[in-house]
Image (cartoon, rainbow, N blue to C red):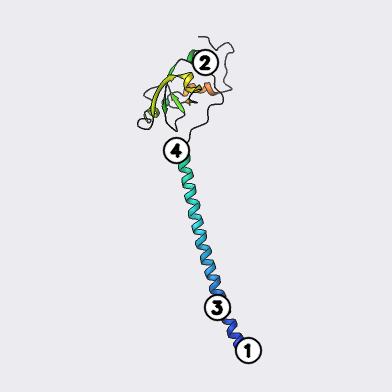
Amino acid sequence: MNITLLKQLNGKLKAFAIVLLLGATTLACQENKELKEETNTVEASATEATAVVDKRPAPEFFVVPAEMAQKRVWICENNTADIFHVKHDCPVLIECKGKGTFRNMTLARAIEDYDRYNCQTCAKDLDFIYDEDAVRMETGLGQQ
Ligand SMILES: [Zn+2]
């Protein structure tokens, strides 16, 4: 075999290899970019999902003092609301307008049947209902 031909062939092979390598790198870059974009889309929709459905599970612990059980409260019935309101004009409750149904019921029913928590805007002082460590007089229940 002619040595010059072998050298030429080698040169061509090298060039070919370089082109292949470049092509592969470019492809890899593109793939990475596409992958990144896809991940971004997934993250975005995940955030959207949590923004829409942020309803908490039913309260695990609550004690409704007997004298408060018949107190009237308001709730917004939709897919996301998980609180009750003691004020019918609470700004959080008013946001329900056009998005859900207003309902008026007893405090006991709102918690037991509708799994509601106290609104932090108008019913913050009812936090103790869900506080397992709150100090309660043992004879307090049912007494005025
Ligand atoms: Zn409220």
The residue to which callout 3 is attached is: 15
Mark 1 C-beta to ligand 1 under 8 Å: no
Q: Which mark is residue 3?
A: 1
Mark 2 C-beta to ligand 1 under 8 Å: no
Q: Which of marks 2 and 1 is nearer the N terminus?
A: 1
Up/down of 81 relative to 37, above or below: above
Considering every residue shown, the one lying at the far left of the view is: 98
Up/down of 119 relative to 18, above or below: above
10 Å crowding of disc 3: few (<14), some (14-19), many (20+)? few
Q: Which of marks 3 and 4 is nearer the N terminus?
A: 3
Horizontal side, residue 88 vs residue 67: left or right:
left
The residue to which callout 2 is attached is: 65
Considering every residue shown, the one lying at the far right of the view is: 1
C-alpha separation, residue under disc 1 versus residue under disc 4: 73 Å
Percent position of residue 123, x then y: 45, 23
Who is closer to the viewer here, 91 or 115? Answer: 115
Amino acid type at circle 3 is: Ala
Can residue 40 be seen from the camera position used here? yes
Dividing the image into 4 quarters, which one contains the N terminus?
bottom right
Q: Which residue is drawn at 42% across and 31% down?
A: 78
Whereabouts is ligand 1, in terms of quadrant? top left
Q: Which of marks 2 and 4 is nearer the N terminus?
A: 4
C-alpha separation, residue under disc 2 versus residue under disc 4: 33 Å
Q: Residue 52 carries which label?
A: 4
Amino acid type at circle 1 is: Ile
C-alpha separation, residue under disc 3 versus residue under disc 1: 19 Å
C-alpha separation, residue under disc 2 versus residue under disc 1: 101 Å
C-alpha separation, residue under disc 3 versus residue under disc 4: 56 Å
Do the residues bearing badges 2 and 1 touch, measured as CB atoms within 8 Å?
Answer: no
Amino acid type at circle 2 is: Pro
